[in-house]
């Protein structure tokens, strides 16, 4: 069951729709409850989009562990059962994925 979900997620991530269609949420910009300025909200959205872009550019073996660990909030033991990879391999992939994301984000900051 998990393998079907993983394969379906991989197919979606490779799809034309995912690569070309951008989801826009206009409701968060004018949120008066938090009394944040529009500038702060836009900066946060820009940061979020750069992080998502960096995650989506990772090789699939790193992307799937990042997705399962941070977005699905699975433990390393649960990920181990889902993707049938050893515990230490998952830890290594998480560490390497974070390093790749950090390098790409630092390159964006220095390149701007």
Image (tube, helix red, strand yellow):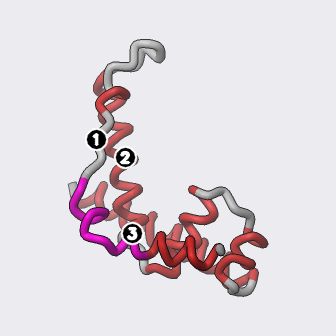
Picture disc at residue 47: 2
Picture disc at residue 94: none
* For residue 112, above or below residue 76: above
Badge 3 crowding class, 10 Å Cα cut-off, few under 14, some 14 to 19, many 20 or more, is: few
- Contact between labelled residues 1 and 2, with CB atoms less than 8 Å apart: no
- Classify residue 33 as left or right of residue 89: left
Q: Quadrant of residue 27?
A: top left
Picture disc at residue 24: 1
Q: Earlier in the sequence, mark 2 or mark 1?
A: 1
- SS type, badge 2: helix
- SS type, badge 1: loop
Q: Which residues are magenta?
A: 11-21
Residue 17 highlighted magenta (yes or no): yes
Residue mark closest to the camera, 3 vs 1? 3
The total number of labels drawn is 3
Inter-mark Cα distance, 3 to 1: 18 Å
Task: Name the spot of residue 37 as percent of width and height, x first.
Answer: 34, 20
Residue mark closest to the camera, 2 vs 1? 1
* For residue 50, above or below residue 56: above
Task: Name the spot of residue 102 as percent of width and height, x first.
Answer: 45, 64
Task: Name the spot of residue 74 as percent of width and height, x first.
Answer: 69, 62
Majority SS type along the magenta span: helix
* For residue 79, above or below residue 106: below
């Amino acid at each position: 069951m998990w393998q079907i979900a993983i394969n379906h997620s991989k197919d979606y991530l490779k799809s034309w729709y995912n690569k070309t269609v951008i989801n826009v949420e206009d409701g968060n910009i004018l949120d008066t409850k938090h009394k944040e300025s529009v500038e702060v909200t836009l900066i946060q959205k820009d940061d979020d989009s750069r992080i998502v872009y960096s995650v989506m550019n990772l090789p699939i073996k790193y992307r799937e562990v990042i997705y399962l660990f941070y977005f699905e909030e699975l433990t390393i033991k649960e990920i181990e059962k889902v993707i049938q990879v050893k515990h230490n391999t998952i830890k290594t992939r998480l560490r390497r994925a974070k390093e790749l994301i950090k390098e790409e984000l630092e390159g964006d900051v220095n390149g701007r």
